[in-house]
Image: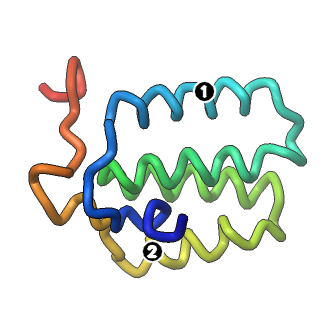
Amino acid sequence: MDRVLLAQTHGGPQWSRVEWAQQLLLRAYTHSSTRHSAPLLTAVAFINWWEGRVSKAHQFLEFALEADPAYRLARLSDQMMGCGMVAGWNMDKDRAFRPSGLEAT
């Protein structure tokens, strides 16, 4: 599990499924109470980090920490991403995220 979280698996993800998961997490977030939103927002932050969107990932982690300042995974993740750690998949052009649709332009 830690290899997936840190984007260090041998094969790359199926990005369309990752995008679908992000939409599902965001939908769950809109229906959750504030006290349960930190894990959802942290998961969305990781997806954005995997995709190379570190600033957006940081924003989601800030939201997670506003919802639950004691949520340790969000705090540690923010420190890790803030130190400049790059998701492993982004080190290989064949596994890195490639935007599609309007994002690609």
Q: Residue at x 22, y 33 (%)?
A: 99
Kindly identify which numbered label has been placed on residue 43: none
Q: Amino acid at mark 2?
A: Gly
In this view, 60 is above or below 8: above
State left or right for residue 14 relative to residue 72.
left
Q: Residue at x 38, y 58 (%)?
A: 54
Q: How far across and down, in percent of the image, does residue 2 sit?
A: 52, 70
Q: Amino acid at mark 1?
A: Leu
State left or right for residue 85 relative to residue 37.
left
Kindly identify which numbered label has been placed on residue 82: 2
Q: Residue at x 60, y 26 (%)?
A: 24
Residue at the outermost top position: 101
The N terminus is located in which quarter? bottom right
Q: Secondary structure at mark 1?
A: helix
The C terminus is located in which quarter? top left
Bin the neighbour count of mark 2 within 10 Å (Cα to Cα): few under 14, some 14-19, many 20 and up: few
State left or right for residue 63 relative to residue 9.
right
Toward the viewer: 38 or 16? Answer: 16
**Looking at the image, how many numbered discs can be counted on the residues?**
2
In this view, 32 is above or below 91: above
Q: Are marks 2 and 1 in contact (CB under 8 Å)?
A: no
Q: CA distance from mark 2 to mark 1?
A: 26 Å
Q: Secondary structure at mark 2?
A: helix
Bin the neighbour count of mark 1 within 10 Å (Cα to Cα): few under 14, some 14-19, many 20 and up: few
Q: Marks 2 and 1: which is nearer the front?
A: 1
Residue behind mark 1: 24
Q: Residue at x 41, y 31 (%)?
A: 17
Q: How far across and down, in percent of the image, does residue 51 sit?
A: 32, 48
Identify the mark nearer the N-term, 2 or 1. Answer: 1
Q: How far across and down, in percent of the image, does residue 14 sit?
A: 32, 37
